[in-house]
Every structure is written in C-alpha cells, then in structure tokens.
Image (cartoon, helix red, strand yellow):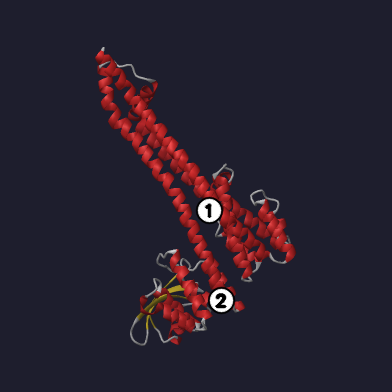
Amino acid sequence: MADFVFEAADANGRRVRGVERALDEAELDRRLRARDLLLLTAQAGRAPTSRRHTSRTLIDFCYHMATVIEAGIPLLEGLRDLQEGGRSAIAEELEDIARKVEAGQPLSDAMAGYPTLFPDLVRSLVAAGEASGHLAEIMRQLVSYLEWREDLGRKLRGAASYPCIVITGLIGLIILLTTVVLPKFLAIFVALDVELPFATRALIGFQHFAEAYGIHTLVFLAASGAIAVAVLRSESGRLAFDRNLLRLPVIGSVMSMIEMSRFSHNLGLLYRAGIPITRCLELIEEIVQNRAIRALIAEGREELAHGATLTQAFGKDALMPSMVVRMIALGESSGGLDRSLDHVANYYDREVPTVIDRSLALVNTGMVVAMGATLGTVAFAIFVPLYRMMGNLNA
C-alpha cells in the first residue's frame, strides 16, 4: 500500500485534491470512480503534506464534531456543514475526509491522510470512540485536553520570553557602554592623568580583550555551539542532556512536573477510551519531550509486555515521582486507574502554574539584580574618574 496525493474532478467539473492509500494507481482510480470522481493526476511515494495550522484549529474541529454528534446529526452531514463555504481553516482537508467517510471509511482512517493536523494520539482516540460508540464523549475529552495543552504552552512561552528579552538587552547595553561610551571618556581621563578605579580598569581590560581577541572568541563560541548542536542531535547526547536537565535545582523540578502532567493527562485520556495500556504508553512516548522520561516509558512498556504491572514497571526509577507511583498503585489495586490518573493530572494542573510563576518571579528578581549591578558597575567606572577629574581641575 502506498499514499497517493491526487487531483480529481467531480460531476460538476470542480477540482478535488486529497490523499488516498491504495495498492497502485489503477486501484486508486477505481476507488475514486466509486465516489463519482475522475482521476486527473496522482503521485505516489511521498508523504502527504498538510498546511500549518494552529492548535485552535484542531480544538474547533473536535468541539464542532462533539456538538454535531450529541445533537444526533449524522457524522457526514456534520463534516459537510463545517466544510461548506470555506468557514473552516481546514475546509480543503475536510472535503477530502468527508468524501472518504461517504465512501465507507471510518473517520479515524480518513484523518490518517493528514498526520500533521491529526496526530496519532487524536486518531487513536477517535478510533477508540468509534469502536465503543462514545465518539462524542471522546471529542469532548479531546477538547479539554487540547485546551489544557494550549494553555500550558502559552504559559511556558511567556515564562521563557521575558528572561530572553532582558538578557539580550543587558548584553547589548554592556556592548554599547564598553565600545561607544567608555572610549570617549577614557581619552579624557588619560589626557588629564586621572587615577582609575578597579571597575574602570576592568572595563578597559574587557574592551582591549574584545578588540584583540573578539574574532577569535566569536569563532570559538561558534565552533563550540556547532559541536554542542551536533552532540544534541545524537540520541545519546540528547538523552544525557535531558537526564542532567532534570537534576538541576529549579529548572529540573519544573521540567519534571510538566512531563508528569503530560504523562498523567494523556495516559488517563487514552486508558479511559479503552485503548490497550501498551498502546497508550507507545503513544505517550511520542508526546513527552524529555528523552530520559521517554526512555523510562519505553522501558516500562517493555516490562509491561512481559507481565509486570505499571507500579512495578515505573516504581524502581527515581525519575518517576513517588506520588505518581503511589497513585498508579492505588488505581491498579482499586480498578480505577483512570480516576487515579485524573487526581494526578489535577494536582499538576494546580502545581505547574504555581511553580512556573514562582520560578519566573525568582528569575525576574535575578534579572533586576543583574541589571542593577551591571549599570551600577558601569556608572561607578565612569563617574568616579569624572569626580576625581573635577577635583584635579579645581586643585
């Protein structure tokens, strides 16, 4: 079987583009004719391409489909309603999906042609909802999960942007003062034989070093950065980096809580949908960002396949917090694993924003202190010699 990106024409002569999986072009042509489509062009052997869409696009799709199904409207009619008139940002994709559903394909299979828009997690949940007859409930749960993920991403981006802006401004200020402002005053200080304090001599030394070895320093930093990027691109290098990242005092705690939040949210959502636990863990491996935790989940999945319980699979590794292990053990013993995971997810939903805000406040305080110390040092380095110079002139 191969993926074909095709262009066809319907009975009204309107051109239709889409993606279809078939053995060959002849089978593709037969499938399209069954849908009253005339095949015009087809290209096999390349992954289907989807335009970039925001997470809000997927949230709107799931919310609309949940509403349609709960109202008793047929699935195909709901897809057509969302697609007609180009009201949806994914109208072109929905047209192709609706045609596949009309031809008898399940919705999850029809969505498989657009993996960047509908990731494995979404397609697996939709397939589980179709099999169990609870597709509307699954769509509602997906909306809640996707909104939580969007809010978390927005908070993380906001937490990272401010320190980056401040550090960039601080570096730019230091360069401006040492390369433009200080040299002009230095010529006056030397001409009048003013005694320079240590701070001024240190800035002058930094300026001379930058002039003499600036190019060499930039080349060294660029080479070091290239080596670091090459190491981080390797699986072993990224694994070691991520493992050490989790051991850092503040950052490690925040990263661990974020990953545990992803783990508990997704595992509870998938398990509640009736997906086998090994498949749940396989999907979660692709969702977590930290390679060390991803390796932990992969090892746990292997042990689970050999007869171990979730508690046994995850309880022996220090990367898995003891609270999470205890809740998993409680869920397994009581038969309510999904409820226990919900408790874990709710805990992290409260704690993660609090920890991020607390860490951000700490970083902001450090930035203000660093900026104040830098400006104070530069001001001291310039104004003390000026004061001494005025004293010499008065004398």
Cα–Cα span, label 1 and label 2: 31 Å
Q: Which residue is mark 2?
A: 135
Residue 380: x, y in percent?
36, 26
Q: Are marks 1 and 2 in contact (CB under 8 Å)?
A: no
Kindly state the secondary structure of the residue where label 1 is placed.
helix
- Where residue 295 appears, as percent x and y from the top left, is 61, 53
Which residue is painted at 35% across and 28% down in the image?
379
Q: Quadrant of the C terminus?
A: top left
> Left or right: where does residue 243 sit relative to residue 115?
right
Q: Which is nearer the N-term, disc 1 or disc 2? A: 2
Identity, as a three-letter code, of the amino acid under mark 1:
Pro
Q: Is residue 303 visible?
A: no
Q: Nearer the viewer, residue 67 or 75?
A: 67
* 67 sits to left or right of 196: right
Q: Residue furthest top?
A: 395
Residue occupied by mark 1: 353
**Front in this rendered view, residue 333 or 288:** 333
Of 139 and 7, which appears nearest the observer? 139
Q: Is residue 170 above or below residue 197?
A: below
Residue 60 quadrant: bottom left
Residue 241 in the image: state x and y as whole percent: 55, 45
Q: Amino acid at mark 2?
A: Leu
Q: Is residue 172 above or below residue 303?
A: above
Q: Is residue 268 visible?
A: yes
